[in-house]
Image: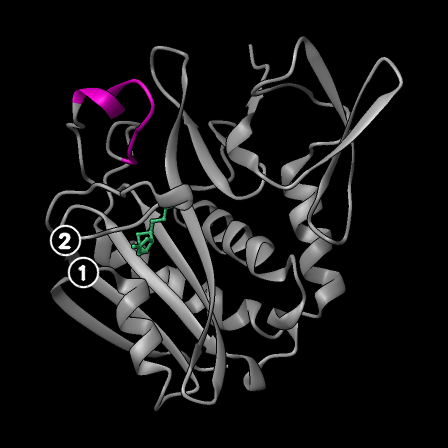
Amino acid sequence: MELLHFHYGSVTSTNDIARELLRDYPAVLVSALYQTHGRGRHGRSWFGEWGKNVYCTIGIQQSQSTLLTHIAAPLAFGAVVVWDTLTTLVGVAPIFLLKYPNDLLGRCPDGAWRKLSGVLVERTVVGQVHACLIGIGINVQQRDFPPSLATEATSLALLGFELTPERVLQQLKRTAESLCESSLRELLQRWRALLQIEGRLLRIQGKHGLWKAVALHDSGQLEVEQGGERLLISDGDSLRYVLD
Ligand code: BTN
């Protein structure tokens, strides 16, 4: 599937622009040098300097893709696009970790895992058109983060990879267009394989002790277990991986 690419200087959020463009175009890739109101999940803002990172949204009308009508497919799509884009550019590196559902973490020189990329999935209706928006932020050349993010965020540059946002975006477009041709089964299998979550030990916000991930369901929910108690999780932000 071809994604029609629209590139801007400054926008509110690439998700907002994609939503409007989907009135007239079946499938778009919207990118910008800067977002004044970049959004993260759970109403958080997504911060990034002008021209240093990738801020983009893949927007697809639902009539164009049965794949993305499945509840978990856009989450999986975001995860696999980011992973395949970056590993194509820098090689499969043990310094990347995909955290459920679709955050990409990078292992920093000090040994800490920090967030390199995040995905915001929104479903929308514009006029008569139902559409899916997959907003992706990848930190590329930014080296300084505000104090509130400094211990949580990283970038390709801080990990030692000298790439430009344009190069990453160009690869992301290619990767996304080819991934649109996957079947749902293939997409979910890839997501599962990349997450490698089954058996992983986790902490869950508001819950005591360590939990073990036992299954990633096709619904996208993660089943976790502790001492015979089982829970279904769909909010990755409440999870902390136990990492060495
Ligand atoms: C998260 O991890 O909380 C999701 C972050 C998603 C950020 C991207 S940047 C491009 C697109 N436009 C937005 O406003 N948000 C997403």
Q: Position of residue 175 (x, y in %)?
A: 47, 64
Instruction: Point out the stretch of residues depicted in magenta.
Output: 147-156
Q: Which mark is residue 123?
A: none
The residue at the point 31 percent across, 60 percent down is 56
Report if the CB atoms under discs 2 and 1 are less than 8 Å apart: yes
Q: Position of residue 193 (x, y in %)?
A: 70, 43
Please identify the quadrant where the C terminus is shown: top right
The residue at the point 32 percent across, 64 percent down is 15
Secondary structure mostly seen in the magenta stretch: loop
Q: Residues within 10 Å of mark 1 (few under 14, many from 20)?
A: some
The residue at the point 18 percent across, 60 percent down is 12
Work out whether residue 133 or residue 27 is closer to the camera in this orientation and state it.
133
Q: Is residue 237 above or below residue 38?
A: above
Question: For residue 99, what is the image quadrant?
Answer: top right
Is residue 154 at least partly visible in the picture? Answer: yes
Q: Is residue 88 above or below residue 228?
A: below
Amino acid on which the number 2 mark rests in the picture:
Thr
Q: Position of residue 122 (x, y in %)?
A: 46, 61
Real-space CA distance between mark 2 and mark 1, rounded to the nearest whole angstrom: 5 Å
Q: Position of residue 92 (x, y in %)?
A: 51, 39
Is residue 99 at least partly visible in the picture? Answer: no
Residue at mark 2: 36
Asked whether mark 1 and ligand 1 are closer than 8 Å, the reply comes as yes
Residue at mark 1: 12
Q: Residue furthest right?
A: 228
SS assignment at label 2: loop
Q: Is residue 151 magenta?
A: yes
Q: Is residue 144 magenta?
A: no
SS assignment at label 1: loop
Question: For residue 32, what is the image quadrant?
Answer: bottom left
Amino acid on which the number 1 mark rests in the picture:
Thr
